[in-house]
């Protein structure tokens, strides 16, 4: 169908302009076959589904809706371009029989010329070509291929318009009978072969369209002048379309690289505005080059528009090399790995950068995707070095203590950081992984000469709090049993005793939530219950605070 359409758009103008065998058998057969096929295509279009405008994934198959849509859009144009108006005109012309005997005389010649003009209506089939090409671009070509296809289609359309313009340059003088001042007569092309006529006509049309001249001779008649202006207007329009599409192609070839250049330009202007030192400018430039690698993406915005499951899959795929290189992830639960990876943040450090400074309060830990870092003690000695697949910074998150050592980037380091909030949220759901990480942290503390028992303070503190609460409750209950008072005092004591026992049972049944790790390891001074006997009554101080672990003995 597409090939037949292209053949019609190319052959029809040539046959109409340069051949006079309009009534030959082969020409009538070709036109009748083409018209029949295109009429059948009109019928098929009434049964072809259409895409819903507001939902590209839904196809409308209702025949009534399809017919209504087709009648409102392309039906009449397709119908006019498919009906053989020239043959109908010749058939219903009453003088056709006599005119056929004298084709080159008077009325018959005018009838044939008018029939030629009516046959030009078939060129309206160009609308079908535009629709078919657009559908092909949407279905078979994506991304860069679609851009190149649009450029290719535009060039082909320009050549087709130039072809039509060349045929028109010769058709108009031919319909006028080749007047002496026409360009055909001046060049003496009336009796030469059709190929030579077409070549000169195409050269004249392309000269006009490209605005490089008027051909061999400038226009000598009013008709030639109007044809020249028409060719120039069509050429200027095609040039503007081509220039716009070419500009769009250049900009869309690598939009990420273009955005990177704009970003770097903006940074350079900022550094110049702030008058930053040359060395610092160089470091900033190298940082951008290493981090973005010549391409800039707003990854957070892109991932934020995806569904949760799709975003998780993309992040897991992007961090697959990290997961494969970190032994801690290799032996961990897949759900744990997924929960951690989706909360990581990508960071880049340059050689010599202090990633972690000793004595500061930690807010994140790091996983090394690529690069080497040194663990530096307070005296400047390098305790150890870590490379791809290692992690560091978890000790202070587990102990809530200050950083026990500094970490310095030895090379360019591509790291993934995990904030303390995400760290605690994930490890609270996977206590086994918490214990594993605590054991690794204890080994590292021992290696750098720090006390590994910091990690055990949490259990000891919680155990001592539990024993203290139980002792206080038992002492209060025993003291209430041995007090001898008057009947009224005994009644009050019994009432107080019941209250104390209920308080003790409530404290034992109370299930406090597990404290976050940032609060688990700080040294705390717990206030004990204060008991005093004031007028035979036991009271608690209002500032007393109770701490209790999950299960009390």
Image (cartoon, grey):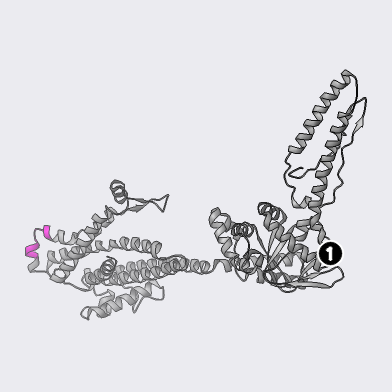
In this view of the protein, can residue 118 be seen by the observer?
A: no
Classified by dominant secondary structure, the portion drawn in magenta counts as helix
> Residue 239: x and y, percent?
43, 69
Q: Secondary structure at mark 1?
A: loop
Number of marks in the image?
A: 1
**Residues in magenta, as a range:** 91-99
Label 1, residues with CA under 10 Å away: few <14, some 14-19, many ≥20? some
Task: Quadrant for residue 29, please give it.
Answer: bottom left
Is 30 placed left or right of 491 in the picture?
Answer: left
Extreme-top residue of the structure: 488
Is 37 placed left or right of 164 in the picture?
Answer: left
Which residue is at 56% across, 53% downward?
A: 308
Is 304 placed left or right of 503 in the picture?
Answer: left
Is residue 253 on the magenta stretch? no
In the foreground, 218 or 328: 328
The correct choice, above or below, for 551 with respect to 265 in the image is: above
> Residue 542: x and y, percent?
86, 34
In the foreground, 491 or 209: 491
What is the quadrant of the C terminus in the image? top right
What is the quadrant of the N terminus in the image? bottom left
Task: Quadrant for residue 537, please give it.
Answer: top right
Which residue is at 54% across, 53% downward?
A: 307
> Residue 348: x and y, percent?
69, 67
Which residue is at 88% across, 31% downward?
A: 479
> Residue 530: x and y, percent?
89, 36
Task: Quadrant for residue 35, please give it.
Answer: bottom left
Check disc 1 and report the residue beneath it.
450
The correct choice, above or below, for 436 with respect to 414 in the image is: above
In the foreground, 67 or 432: 432
């Amino acid at each position: 169908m597409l090939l037949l359409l292209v053949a019609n758009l190319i052959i029809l103008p040539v046959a109409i302009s340069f051949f006079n065998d309009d009534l030959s058998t082969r020409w009538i057969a070709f036109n009748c076959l083409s018209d029949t096929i295109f009429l059948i295509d009109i019928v098929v279009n009434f049964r072809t589904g259409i895409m819903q405008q507001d939902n590209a994934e839904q196809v409308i198959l209702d025949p009534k809706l399809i017919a209504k849509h087709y009648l409102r859009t392309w039906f009449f144009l397709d119908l006019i371009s498919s009906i053989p108006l020239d043959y109908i005109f010749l058939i219903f012309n009453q003088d056709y029989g006599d005119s056929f005997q004298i084709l080159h005389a008077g009325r018959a010649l005018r009838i044939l010329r008018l029939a030629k003009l009516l046959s030009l209506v078939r060129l309206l089939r160009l609308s079908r070509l535009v629709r078919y090409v657009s559908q092909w671009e949407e279905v078979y070509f994506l991304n860069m291929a679609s851009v190149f296809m649009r450029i290719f289609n535009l060039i082909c359309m320009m050549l087709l318009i130039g072809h039509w313009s060349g045929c028109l340059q010769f058709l108009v003088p031919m319909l006028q009978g080749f007047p002496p001042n026409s360009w055909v007569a001046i060049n003496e092309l009336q009796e030469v072969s059709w190929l030579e006529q077409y070549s000169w006509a195409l050269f004249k049309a392309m000269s006009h369209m490209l605005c490089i001249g008027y051909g061999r001779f400038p226009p000598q008649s009013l008709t030639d002048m109007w044809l020249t202006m028409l060719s120039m207007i069509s050429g200027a329009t095609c040039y503007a379309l081509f220039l716009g599409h070419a500009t769009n192609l250049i900009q869309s070839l690598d939009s990420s690289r273009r955005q990177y250049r704009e970003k770097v330009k903006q940074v350079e202007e900022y550094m110049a505005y702030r008058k930053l030192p040359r060395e610092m400018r160089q470091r900033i430039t190298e940082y951008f080059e290493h981090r973005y690698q010549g391409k800039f993406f707003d990854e957070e915005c892109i991932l934020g528009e995806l569904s949760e499951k799709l975003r998780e899959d993309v992040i897991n795929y992007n961090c697959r090399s990290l997961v494969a290189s970190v032994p801690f992830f290799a032996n961990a639960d897949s759900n744990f790995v997924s929960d951690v990876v989706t909360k990581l943040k990508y960071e880049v450090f340059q050689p010599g950068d202090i990633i972690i400074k000793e004595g500061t309060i930690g807010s994140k830990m790091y996983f090394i995707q690529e690069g080497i870092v040194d663990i530096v003690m307070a005296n400047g000695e390098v305790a150890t070095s870590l490379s791809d697949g290692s992690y560091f910074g978890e000790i202070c998150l587990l102990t809530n203590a200050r950083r026990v050592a500094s970490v310095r980037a030895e090379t360019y380091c591509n790291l993934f950081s995990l904030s303390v909030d995400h760290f605690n949220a994930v490890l609270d759901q996977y206590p086994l992984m918490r214990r594993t990480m605590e054991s690794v942290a204890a080994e590292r503390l021992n290696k750098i000469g720090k006390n590994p028992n910091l990690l055990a303070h949490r259990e000891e503190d919680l155990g001592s709090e539990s024993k203290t609460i139980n002792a206080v409750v038992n002492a209060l209950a025993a003291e209430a049993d041995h007090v001898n008072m008057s009947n009224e005092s005994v009644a009050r004591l019994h009432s107080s005793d019941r209250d104390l026992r209920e308080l003790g049972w409530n404290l034992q049944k109370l299930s406090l939530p597990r404290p976050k790790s940032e609060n688990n390891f700080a040294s705390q001074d717990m206030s004990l219950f204060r008991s005093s006997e004031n007028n035979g009554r036991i009271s608690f101080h209002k500032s007393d605070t109770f701490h209790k672990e999950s299960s009390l003995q």
